[in-house]
């Protein structure tokens, strides 16, 4: 049988190749054995809009029913944060989400959530991974049979989430502000809940389409050209929100159709929560996030910690310490007062509330942040290379062979997770993806043109001589 390994955020594989009913059974059986050892008894299971989601979720439910667990199964597709919230609200020991998040449409996946409402910590993931059997269970009772026996209950997790949003946001203020909103679900699981929260939003790709029209549902600028064009040409629109396939990540646009990346969103969140909501706590960011966050945190006198790539590292800290803001470059952000989980819709509503309370545009708020930390731009290239070439580049970074990038001399190198090269006020980072067969190259500089120049020079420097 296929060896199953969990990556940065869950197990992901190509549907009908490695991602099969039998392999979902194997993973589910491992989770059952682990939960039994921990004397756990209750699980909540959901799925997003990917192909086969309902079937795979019901397969997992059948395995948990075979082991005698109490099962709460989503009555329809849901966002990942809905499952995380449900683990808390319904008192479940574990949450299972059938999703491959932002991966291409040929993938599906399996995420694990713990009782605190966030990603299961890496050490426990490793324990579960070690329990995956070589063969799968045979014929099992169906979800309907388990429901008839009283072992499974179908639950409306979307309504549970909507009630939680209404209790925590001033939706009347947002509505009365008359900020014109556009929303792109990227055919993902946010397509039903966002229109219920913001019924006047202009909607893009909010229909059920497991093919995602062939586009990986990752909310980055190159995948959101229709949204960008809409924001740039419709003078009324002032706030453009996009989410990935399971709606735990965020993409954002201002009224000019300019992409507002996660680095800027993190800075806005810290600015809003500390200065306007008078909240304090630790700031936790992953290795690829802008150093401007350190500058702002230190300006406010707040402790900051940098982790490896992967929100699970942030979540683990959030369960143990008082964290104000936590986030990663790829759009997974979390704040105090919610579950320790990435939630693209929740973060979008927080920024929207900030705009409504201050009666300021995104552009104005970002300029206020720039007054504190200085302006900057960021971008990322994903290089699809052979494994041999990818490993050769990583070896080159590891052995200290990168002394300059173009005409820029490398002054300092860090290797918390990947390799980050500092050159004055600019930096470049190289790291293989934990969820896709690509090499990611990140860059920060004073403006977009300088970022592009740095990335182009990096491609030459990294691949020279290989």
Image (tube, rainbow, N blue to C red):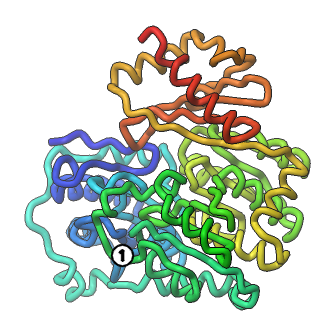
Q: Quadrant of the N terminus?
A: top left
Q: Secondary structure at mark 1?
A: loop
Q: Which residue reaches farthest front?
A: 233
View extreme (left): residue? 139
Tell me if I can see residue 118 in this picture: yes
Residue 175 at x, y = what percent? 69, 88
Q: Is residue 15 left or right of residue 328?
A: left
Question: Residue 54, located in which quarter of the rendered image?
Answer: bottom left
Q: Quadrant of residue 406?
A: top right
Q: Residue at point 87% right, 58% down?
A: 368
Look at the picture and state if 263 lies above or below 434.
Answer: below
Q: Is residue 321 above or below residue 201?
A: above
Q: Which residue is mark 1?
A: 77
Of residues 220 and 81, the one drawn nearer to the viewer in this rendering: 220
On screen, residue 350 versus residue 137, left or right, reads right
Q: Quadrant of the C terminus?
A: top left
Residue 93 is at least partly visible in this image: no
In this rendering, the answer to whether 153 lies above or below 327 is: below
Give me the residue at 38% from left, 64% from top: 96
Return the x and y of residue 249 as percentages of the image width and height.
53, 60
Residue in the foreground of this view, choosing between 107 and 255:
255
Which x, y percent locates residue 432? 46, 32
Residue 174: percent from the left, percent from the top? 71, 84
Above or below 444: residue 167: below
Which is nearer the eye, 327 or 199? 199
- Classify 10 Å Cα crowding around label 1: few (below 14), some (14-19), many (20 and above): many
Residue at 58% across, 46% down = 313
- Say whether residue 261 is left or right of residue 170: left
């Amino acid at each position: 049988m296929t060896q199953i390994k969990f990556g940065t955020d869950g197990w992901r594989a190509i549907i009908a190749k490695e991602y099969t009913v039998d392999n979902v059974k194997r993973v589910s059986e491992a989770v059952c054995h682990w939960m039994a050892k921990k004397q756990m008894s209750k699980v909540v299971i959901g799925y997003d809009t990917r192909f086969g989601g309902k079937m795979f979720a019901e397969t997992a439910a059948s395995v948990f029913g075979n082991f005698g667990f109490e099962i709460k199964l989503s009555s329809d597709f849901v966002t990942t944060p809905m499952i995380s919230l449900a683990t808390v609200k319904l008192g479940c020991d574990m949450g299972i989400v059938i999703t491959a998040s932002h991966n291409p449409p040929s993938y599906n996946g399996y995420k694990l959530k713990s009782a605190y409402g966030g990603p299961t910590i890496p050490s426990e993931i490793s324990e579960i991974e070690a329990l995956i059997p070589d063969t799968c269970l045979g014929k099992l009772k169906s979800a309907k049979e388990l429901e008839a026996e009283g072992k499974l209950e179908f639950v409306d997790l979307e309504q549970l989430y909507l009630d939680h949003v209404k209790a925590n946001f001033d939706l009347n203020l947002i509505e009365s502000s008359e900020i014109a909103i556009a929303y792109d679900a990227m055919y993902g699981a946010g397509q039903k809940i966002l229109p219920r929260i913001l019924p006047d939003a202009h909607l893009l790709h909010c229909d059920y389409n497991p093919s995602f029209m062939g586009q990986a549902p990752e909310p980055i600028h190159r995948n959101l050209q229709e949204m960008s064009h809409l924001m740039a040409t419709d003078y009324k629109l002032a706030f453009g929100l996009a989410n990935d396939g399971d709606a735990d990540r965020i993409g954002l646009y201002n009224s000019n159709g300019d992409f507002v990346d996660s680095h800027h969103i993190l800075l806005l969140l810290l600015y809003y929560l500390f200065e306007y909501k008078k909240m304090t706590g630790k700031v936790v960011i992953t290795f690829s996030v802008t150093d401007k966050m350190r500058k702002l945190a230190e300006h406010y006198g707040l402790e900051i910690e940098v982790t490896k790539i992967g929100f699970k590292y942030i979540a683990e800290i959030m369960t143990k310490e008082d964290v104000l803001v936590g986030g990663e470059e790829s759009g997974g952000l979390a704040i105090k007062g919610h579950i320790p989980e990435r939630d693209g819709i929740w973060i979008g509503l927080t920024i929207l509330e900030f705009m409504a309370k201050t009666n300021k545009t995104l552009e104005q708020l970002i300029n206020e942040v720039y007054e504190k930390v200085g302006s900057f731009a960021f971008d990322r290239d994903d290089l699809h290379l052979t494994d041999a070439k990818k490993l050769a580049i990583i070896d080159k970074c590891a052995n200290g062979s990168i002394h300059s990038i173009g005409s820029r001399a490398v002054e300092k190198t860090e290797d918390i997770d990947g390799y980050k090269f500092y050159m004055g006020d600019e930096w470049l980072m190289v790291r293989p993806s934990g969820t896709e067969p690509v090499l990611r190259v990140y860059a920060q500089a004073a403006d977009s043109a300088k970022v592009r120049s740095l990335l182009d020079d990096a491609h030459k420097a990294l691949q020279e001589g290989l």
